[in-house]
Image: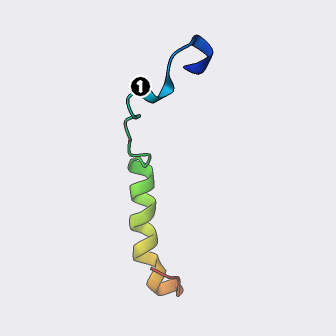
Amino acid sequence: MLDAIGQDPKLAPAPMLERQANQRSDEWVDRYRAEAPRLGLPT
């Protein structure tokens, strides 16, 4: 994108990293961990 407007991409700051999970994902992981041993799934 920066090349297209004549700017040097190496001068741009690195993008900020953001956590991609949300509360729903956290709840799924908790439920999986609770049920996995009973179902013989890896943990």
**Is residue 25 shown above or below 42?**
above
Q: Please tell me whether mark 1 sits on a helix, a strand or a loop.
A: helix
**Quadrant of the snapshot with the C terminus:** bottom left
On screen, residue 20 versus residue 4, left or right, reads left
Number of residues whose C-alpha sits closer than 10 Å to that of mark 1, classed few (under 14), some (14–19) or many (20 or more): few
Considering only vertical position in the picture, is 13 above or below 22? above
Question: Considering depth in this image, is 18 or 31 the residue closer to the camera?
Answer: 18
Which residue is found at the position 46% from the left and 70% from the top? 32
The structure residue drawn at horizontal position 43% and vertical position 67%, both measured from the top left corner, is: 31
> Which percent across, then down, holds residue 10?
46, 29
Q: Position of residue 22 (x, y in %)?
A: 41, 47
Q: Residue at x 38, y 49 (%)?
A: 23
Going by the numbered disc 1, the residue's amino acid type is Leu
At 51% from the left and 16% from the top, the residue drawn is: 7
Nearer-the-camera pick, 35 or 41: 41
Quickly name the residue at label 1.
11
Q: Is residue 30 above or below residue 39?
A: above
Residue placed most toward the observer, 13 or 28: 13
Quadrant in which the N terminus is drawn: top right
| x and y percentages locating residue 13 in the rendered image | 38, 29
Number of marks in the rendered image: 1
Q: Is residue 27 above or below residue 32?
A: above
Residue furthest out toward the top: 5
Q: Is residue 3 left or right of residue 42?
A: right
Which quadrant of the view contains residue 27? bottom left
Residue farthest to the right, as pictured: 4
